[in-house]
Amino acid sequence: MTIEQLKTLVISELDSRNLKSRVRYSALDKIIPFIKKQYGVGVASLPKSKEEVKAAYEKEKGCAINGAESSVINELYNQLTNVHSY
């Protein structure tokens, strides 16, 4: 599975829960390029720990991540768990 496919799953999940907040989509649009740059385009290269991704993103950003960013990273990992391809 690619990061783009994972992004599509997250968008579908957010839409299904009526979480159409622009803040979450904006956070997703910032996090996905970071993940691709940091870990590559395949989900197999992602760290097993979402906390590791959060820490790396926070370091890259230069300040604490916000709630929407944390929520998006959590949802990325939730979708990985749901598809069992990780």
Image (cartoon, helix red, strand yellow):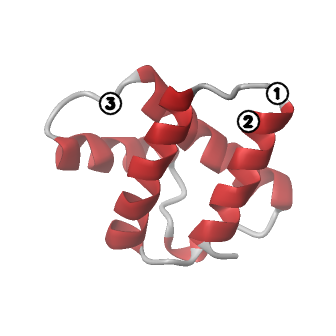
> Separation of disc 2 and disc 3 at Cα?
19 Å
Q: Hey, which quadrant is residue 2 in on the image?
A: bottom right
Check disc 3 and give the amino acid type: Ile
Are there few (<14), some (14-19), or many (20+) residues within 10 Å of tag 1? few
> Which of the two labelled residues, at mark 1 and mark 3, occupies the earlier sequence position?
1
Q: Secondary structure at mark 2?
A: helix
Residue occupying image coordinates x 68% and y 28%:
20
16 or 50, which lies in front?
16
Q: Secondary structure at mark 1?
A: loop
User: Whole-percent x and y of residue 56?
Assistant: 29, 50
Q: Is residue 19 left or right of residue 45?
A: right
68 or 49, which lies in front?
68
Check disc 2 and give the amino acid type: Leu
User: Whole-percent x and y of residue 24?
Assistant: 54, 32
In the displayed structure, 31 sits above or below 85; it is: above
Q: Which mark is residue 65?
A: 3
Check disc 1 and give the amino acid type: Arg
Q: Which mark is residue 60?
A: none
Q: Which mark is residue 17?
A: 1
Q: Which residue is mark 2?
A: 14
- Check contact, mark 2 vs mark 1: CB within 8 A: yes
> Which of the two labelled residues, at mark 2 and mark 3, occupies the earlier sequence position?
2
In the displayed structure, 24 sits above or below 53; it is: above
Q: Secondary structure at mark 3?
A: loop
User: Whole-percent x and y of residue 55?
Assistant: 31, 42
User: Whole-percent x and y of residue 42?
Assistant: 56, 77
Residue occupying image coordinates x 85% and y 35%:
16
Q: Nearer the viewer, mark 2 or mark 3?
A: 2
